[in-house]
Image: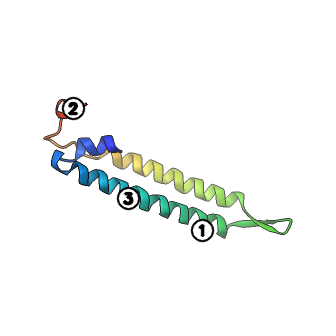
Amino acid sequence: MPGLIIHAAPRSELAAANGLNALFRSVGSSLASAIGGAILAAQTISLAGHALPSLAGYRTLFAICAGAAVAAALLALFIPRHAATSDAALPE
């Protein structure tokens, strides 16, 4: 993602763009953990008196994760390259 940001953001905005990336990664990680926990807690089976996540819960969670990964990959294809930024202008 930082590579996509470098190519899409103007040089004067790179720090802000990378900061927003870090912020959204933190928010996304927190949200994904909460949603995953809620799905697994809602779809349980009882085994020896203990409530455990069911196979359907894991399948639902993995389907959501796969859908999110495909959506993110498709969105990444549409990130435009900034006209003022080229590979030759970037420091190595």
Q: Nearer the viewer, mark 3 or mark 1?
A: 3
On the rendered structure, is 4 left or right of 10? right
Please tell me how crowded label 2 is: few (under 14), some (14-19), or many (20+) other residues with Cα within 10 Å. few
Q: Does 68 appear above or below 45?
A: above
Choose the circle earlier in sequence order: 3 or 1: 3
Tell me the kind of residue under disc 3. Answer: Phe
Where residue 33 appears, x then y in whole percent?
Answer: 54, 61
- Which residue sits at x=54%, y=65%? 35
| Residue 45, quarter of the rendered image | bottom right
Q: Which residue occupies the foreground of this view, 43 or 18?
A: 18
- CB of mark 3 within 8 Å of CB of mark 2? no
Tell me the kind of residue under disc 1. Answer: Ala
Calculate the distance from the C-alpha at mark 3 to the C-alpha at mark 2. Answer: 26 Å
Q: Which residue occupies the foreground of this view, 76 or 3?
A: 3
Choose the circle earlier in sequence order: 3 or 2: 3
In this figure, which residue is indicated by the disc labeled 1? Answer: 38
Tell me the kind of residue under disc 2. Answer: Asp
Choose the circle earlier in sequence order: 1 or 2: 1
Q: In the current view of this chain or complex, which residue is farthest to the right?
A: 48
Quarter occupied by the C terminus: top left
- Which residue sits at x=51%, y=60%? 32
- Name the mark on residue 87: 2
In this figure, which residue is indicated by the disc labeled 3? Answer: 24
- Name the mark on residue 55: none
Label 1: state its secondary structure: helix
- Which residue sits at x=24%, y=50%? 15
Quarter occupied by the N terminus: top left
Q: Which residue occupies the foreground of this view, 39 or 28?
A: 28
